[in-house]
Image: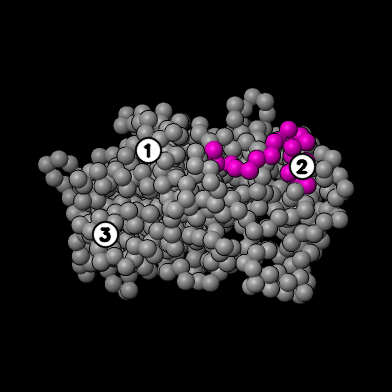
């Protein structure tokens, strides 16, 4: 095994959190930092063209190519489960939507961890720290940071009509989903710069890459963490990894930081002998440290994709199904970096409540001027739009578990979608609400005809089953190394993201969320990394 050197800090994973950490920790010249990324550089052209997510997801060049187990709640279906395998991680392949979540999310984290520094008013400055927002709203936004936020560079008549229809059924219009209460309907803000994707590699890693104290190793996959027993207990002393047909060991003087995401981080811990003892023993792995919560508490947003055929309005279906339409789309992007090639996967959003008992918005809509049978299939050849809706706070819980001793084998991913009566009811209620919006006067002239799930599904039981047929992940897995109080047997890290019972080891990514945020999860992960960097540097000094 080759020695890769000794570092103050080793960061495992060059995704959204890892890029932030590499920048912040290496900003101090005395810190020698190593960043290890399993994927390659973010130099694939389709990463940077917004519509290129179509060519990055389910592509082994940029995606881990995971799949879920067959899900009972999805009527036996298995889903693709994209995770970024490239510098920038999921920020290189995701929907580019800038979303913080709701105030109540962070106040709940503070309650669950017993640490008020996770409250909304405490984390808002961290969101603003890295933000470069187009607006001049100084109360909620900031300019000059690394994380660029812009308005989208297109609009659609059919989406404007959906927004009017939502208002007619009681969902007000809003121009900003990021003030702590995101109830309303409007166009999403996106992480783009003049119509080009802005990922965390461009934002945080490239400005730091020239620093002499930062080493970036791509194409290197971690096998396991290495530990040492001392008089004060167990300590992580480094990382064993494979890269360039060689086995390496890098030693960490101060800390090793797992930033490999909600699938990667628990998998690395389990392969290192940290996790549920019964599970590890079943695979013949020696237990280095028992933590039953590793890989448990998996939460994700399941989007239920209703699709409607229409007349009298332009949609991407008809534009992209002719050679001249494709040529026009390409020419507009080449000349102005606008139009359909600058599209995020979803353009219009809405946050609302599934019923009157909800104290805040518990549903999120992603509305798109297109339709298709499933991801990867061609668009339909008739005008249509899709109104996807997800339960923001699912009560279903799943798990991530390695299946053998091979550290390169894909883990078992079981989200357990729609496994609770509460989630099934909200799924049915959300489909009913979608139909109410579609029936509003603003959409009447387009004669919307429900293709999916289909008007034949009427009762709550029928709609819940239909949701299982058309539901798909919106790629927001969190929670598999949850933070919590020290007396919480399901917690993996404390409120400063230190792994419980192991010195010199933290987890910093979406896996530490005890509960999923009420919205898209990428920017909350960046905030978590900003907060962790402060903790790490404080501990050093």
Q: Which residue is mark 3?
A: 33
* Residue visible at 42% across and 41% down in the picture: 125
Q: Quadrant of residue 407?
A: bottom left
Q: Which mark is residue 166?
A: none
Q: What stretch of residues is rendered in magenta?
A: 161-179
Decide: is 411 above or below 320: above
In screen coordinates, is 122 left or right of 341? left
Q: Which residue is mark 1?
A: 483
In depth, the one of 500 and 29 nearer the eye is 29
Residue at the left extreme, as displayed: 231
Label 1 residue SS: loop
Q: Position of residue 81 (x, y in %)?
A: 54, 55
Q: Which residue is mark 2?
A: 164
Q: Position of residue 502 (x, y in %)?
A: 24, 43
Tell me if I can see residue 476 in this picture.
no
Q: Position of residue 8 (x, y in %)?
A: 21, 56
In screen coordinates, is 339 left or right of 298? right
């Amino acid at each position: 095994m080759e020695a890769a050197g000794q570092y103050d800090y080793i960061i495992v994973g060059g995704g959204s959190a890892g890029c932030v950490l590499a920048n912040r920790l290496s900003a101090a010249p005395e810190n020698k930092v190593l960043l290890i990324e399993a994927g390659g550089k973010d130099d694939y052209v389709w990463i940077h063209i917004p519509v290129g997510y179509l060519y990055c997801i389910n592509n082994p060049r940029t995606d881990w190519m995971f799949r879920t187990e067959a899900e009972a709640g999805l009527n036996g279906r298995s889903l693709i489960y994209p995770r970024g395998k490239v510098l920038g991680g999921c920020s290189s392949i995701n929907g580019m939507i800038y979303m913080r979540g709701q105030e109540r999310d962070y106040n709940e984290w503070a309650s669950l961890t017993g640490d008020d520094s996770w409250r909304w008013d405490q984390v808002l400055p961290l969101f603003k720290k890295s933000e470069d927002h187009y607006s001049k709203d100084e109360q909620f936004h900031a300019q000059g940071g690394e994380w660029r936020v812009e308005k989208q560079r297109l609009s659609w008549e059919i989406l404007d009509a959906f927004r009017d229809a939502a208002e007619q059924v009681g969902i007000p219009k809003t121009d900003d989903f990021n003030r702590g209460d995101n109830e309303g309907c409007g166009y999403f803000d996106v992480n783009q710069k003049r119509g080009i994707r802005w990922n965390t590699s461009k934002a945080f890693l490239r400005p730091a890459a020239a620093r002499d104290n930062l080493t970036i190793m791509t194409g290197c996959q971690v096998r396991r963490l290495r530990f040492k027993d001392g008089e004060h207990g167990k300590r992580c002393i480094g990382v064993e990894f494979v890269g360039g047909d060689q086995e390496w060991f890098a030693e960490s003087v101060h800390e090793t930081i797992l930033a490999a995401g909600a699938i990667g981080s628990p998998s690395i811990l389990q392969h290192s002998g940290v996790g549920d003892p019964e599970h590890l023993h079943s695979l013949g792995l020696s237990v280095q440290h028992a933590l039953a919560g590793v890989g448990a508490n998996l939460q994700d947003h399941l989007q239920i994709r209703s699709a409607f055929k229409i007349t009298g309005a332009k949609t991407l279906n008809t534009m992209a199904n002719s050679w001249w339409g494709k040529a026009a789309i390409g020419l507009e992007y080449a000349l102005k970096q606008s139009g359909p090639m600058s599209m995020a996967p979803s353009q219009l959003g809405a946050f609302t409540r599934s019923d009157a008992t909800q104290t805040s918005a518990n549903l999120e809509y992603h509305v798109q001027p297109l339709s298709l049978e499933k991801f990867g299939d061609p668009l339909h050849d008739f005008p249509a739009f899709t109104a996807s809706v997800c339960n923001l706070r699912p009560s279903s819980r799943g798990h991530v578990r390695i299946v053998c001793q091979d550290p390169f084998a894909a883990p078992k991913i079981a989200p357990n979608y729609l496994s609770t009566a509460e989630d099934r009811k909200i799924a049915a209620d959300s489909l009913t609400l979608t139909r109410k919006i579609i029936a509003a006067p603003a959409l009447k002239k387009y004669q919307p005809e429900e293709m999916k799930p289909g008007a034949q599904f009427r009762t709550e039981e029928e709609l819940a089953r239909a949701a299982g047929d058309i539901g798909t992940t919106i790629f927001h897995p969190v929670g598999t190394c949850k933070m919590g109080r020290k007396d919480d047997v399901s917690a993996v890290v404390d409120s400063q993201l230190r792994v419980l019972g192991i010195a010199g080891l933290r987890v910093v990514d979406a896996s530490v969320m005890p509960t999923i945020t009420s919205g898209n999860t990428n920017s909350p992960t960046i905030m978590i990394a900003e907060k962790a960097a402060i903790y790490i540097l404080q501990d050093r000094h």
